[in-house]
Amino acid sequence: MILCVCLSPAIDVTYRVDRLVPGATVWVGGVVQRPGGKAVNVAMAGKERTTYPLEAFLDLGAFLEAANNERLKEMPPRLAPFLETHRFHEVVGEIRQNTASPAAFRKRFFRWFDGFMAMKMIHFLRDQSYSERGIYEEAERLKELITTSTDITKNAPELLTWYRRRQQRKLARQPTPPA
């Protein structure tokens, strides 16, 4: 059995057709669906399954909290080389000069520090300050951080079941969006 925890799972779909003619109706002879995405492909290749270190996300969270509250001097020190590379102080100075309110500052700042920049920071932290870790170990550490549960998971399938149940309970509490 291959167990894989994917933050962005994918399904690879293959359609079998007799022939492909541009502009013509194509009849599908069969469909094959299988798990896909990087995590699944790595797992199926038999390589050790690793993930980003939890500390990188904690550092990112501290950075975002400081930025959101305009306490930019409270950044984790290990971020300094990353911020210098991306001209952080120059960008923040320019944003401050061109905004009149904290709300405007946050809007412009987070337009600059978008999801792509966040992933660059996570990669930088992984490469420069921490290293990749085993998926199971990091998932256990995250569980300890987000809950006071003393449930002991003996193996990866049990841990995956724990996360799935937690997600189902969370979804069950959310109001249904209007149709």
Image: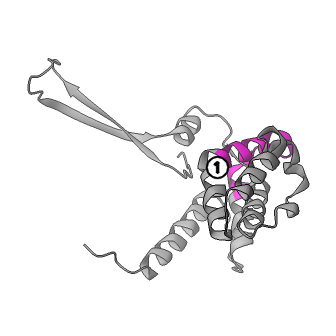
Left or right, 53 with reference to 19: right
Which residue is tagged 1?
112
The front one of 121 and 4 is: 121
Categorize mark 1 by other alpha carbons within 10 Å: few (<14), some (14-19), many (20+).
some
Residue at 17%, 19% (x, y): give it: 20
Question: Quadrant where the C terminus lies?
Answer: bottom left
Residue farthest toward the right in the current orientation of the protein: 77
Residue 86's spot in the image, x, y percent? 76, 40
Relative to 70, residue 127 above or below: above
The front one of 62 and 102 is: 102
Q: Is residue 131 visible?
A: no
Task: State which quadrant residue 68 falls in.
Answer: bottom right
Amino acid type, callout 1 = Trp
Relative to 29, residue 91 above or below: below
Residue at 73%, 56% (x, y): give it: 97
Q: Is residue 3 magenta?
A: no
Query: Which span of residues is magenta-colored?
Result: 117-138
Name the element at disc 1. helix
Task: State which quadrant residue 59 falls in.
Answer: bottom right
Residue 102's spot in the image, x, y percent? 68, 69
Relative to 113, residue 31 above or below: above
Residue 93's spot in the image, x, y percent? 78, 52
Residue farthest toward the left in the current orientation of the protein: 25
Give the prevailing secondary structure in the magenta stretch. Answer: helix
Task: State which quadrant residue 176 falls in.
Answer: bottom left
Q: Is residue 52 visible?
A: yes
Residue at 85%, 40% (x, y): give it: 128
Residue 157's spot in the image, x, y percent? 57, 59
The front one of 20 and 128 is: 128
Relative to 69, residue 19 above or below: above
Left or right, 170 with reference to 26: right
The front one of 44 and 163 is: 163
